[in-house]
Amino acid sequence: MNAWAATTDIAVRFRGFKKSFGTKVVHRDVSFDVRRGECLGLLGGSGAGKSVILRSLVGLEKPDAGEVWVENENISQYNEQSLIDIRRKVAYVFQNGALFDSMSVYDNLAYALREHTRLTHDEIKKRVLDTLQEFGLAGNEKLFPSNLSGGMQKRVGLARSIILQPSIVLYDEPTAGLDPYNTRRICDMMLRLKAKGATAIFVTHDMPAAFSVCDRIAVLKDGKIHAIGTREEIERQDPWVAKFIQGEEL
Amino acid sequence: MSTLVIAISDRISRRFGNLFRMFGGAWLLFVQSCRDLFTRPRYPRLVIDQLYSIGVESSALLLVTAGFSGMVMALQFGLGLEKFGGKLYVPKIVSLSIVREISPVFCSLMFAARVGAGIASEIASMVVTQQIDAIRVLGTSPIKRIVIPRILACLIALPLLCVLGNFVGIIGAGIVGVTELGLDATFFYQKVLETVSLVDFLTGFLKTFFFALFISLTACHFGLTVQGGTQGVGRATTLAVVISSISVLISDYFLTKLFYVLLEKP
């Protein structure tokens, strides 16, 4: 029996994660857990490697050393074929939406359903239109990504990511560059998904958004998890973290 | 002095390193594409879409190229041979040149410029805007959805366009032969039919499959390995066109030699 089996309430686990790009060492030894149904905020300065953590969870980056566990599988050495099942369980919300610009909004959302389910044309249509309705995007299904505003693109990206009803959602700065109203809408959607039981990791520089959505916060510094816990806990643990969160000079 | 030698050798080794990395990358892409071609899911619809944008939309450019190449060949040979009373040999020389070399090579070069650039810039833009990552994250394969349809479309479209190019080139040469050189149209086309054999046709036709593979693989490779944002997209596109055009010209010599040994040697 592996260590995982004893802790089945853990959805994501990093152990001794190391990653370098050329001579630049990004992660020296990253270890943390995310509990099932929890939303963990991942904070850190620019270039701290927050997005690399997310990309490693869907196999877009391979660790140089260490383990990456998703549900009950160590995916660190999985090949593309083996990762397909993991990617159906883990949704990735890209910073810029990463919508397919040659497809309409409808086709962007229907993409995963056509690829991974045996739903009929009508069932797919119903699921797509329901999802668009849920995300406040009804009536936009025929538009192409270039016709959408930044906020709408991000909401379509979020809708596309969760349409297969994944158990884990990874948010890579979904509120970056948005006005307060659209930030609020994205946060509300994240809270709705959380209420449905989805586990999440939320990478952001937007502190109010992080504190409004996340159960715990992890701070990356010098290639390691510098602090992890609730906002009060990490601010109490380390004055550096308190200054970082409040945007004071470090 | 020793610093200079080290710097030069470092530069040379880096250049060769890049070259080997490029060939290695394209080879790996080829192997992976061959492997994925025979596994599910398959996307015939995407191949048809690509056939339209790669084949149908390139046809006008390639046919104009072939037509005017044939016309200029007939004019050059006609005016040159006229001095020696050899004008009657124009249909033979021109038709053989078109079918064996001019049409396959010129069509492939134009194909590399239009289609190679298009594929490389499209894929590179998809990489830069994380659309390729999105394809992977959504549990699908960019090799199957992006690379294989483009390679297959090129493998189907370029040989067919080359065959059309042969016809258009010979018709163009015939027009010049009749209007500029004063040759009889029936005589011209009869000589073409007497001269061009199946082996001549196959020598040119079979090359285009290799050219199509080199162009599509090179373009896909440079598109997928783009680095450095929008500036990188431009660099990848330029490199794809340059390398695929050079590949066409270099491989043309070796393929001609190979087909000579296989098809013509007694």
Image (cartoon, helix red, strand yellow):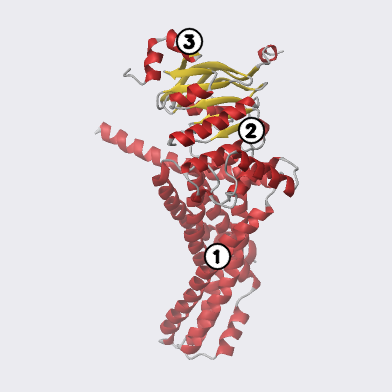
Q: Nearer the viewer, residue A246 or A9?
A: A246
Label 1, secondary structure: give it: helix
Q: Assign the N terminus of chain A to one quadrant of the image.
A: top right
Q: Quadrant of residue B11?
A: top left
Structural distance between the alpha carbons of marks 2 and 1: 36 Å
Tag 2 residue: A87
Do marks 3 and 2 both belong to one polypeptide chain? yes
Which chain is mark 2 on?
A: A
Q: What's the amino acid at mark 3?
A: Glu
Q: Report the disc number at residue B235.
A: none
Which chain is mark 1 on?
A: B
Structural distance between the alpha carbons of marks 3 and 2: 33 Å
Tag 1 residue: B57
| A58 shown above or below B158 | above
- Percent from the top left, x then y, of residue A224? 46, 16
Structural distance between the alpha carbons of marks 1 and 3: 63 Å
Which chain is mark 3 on?
A: A
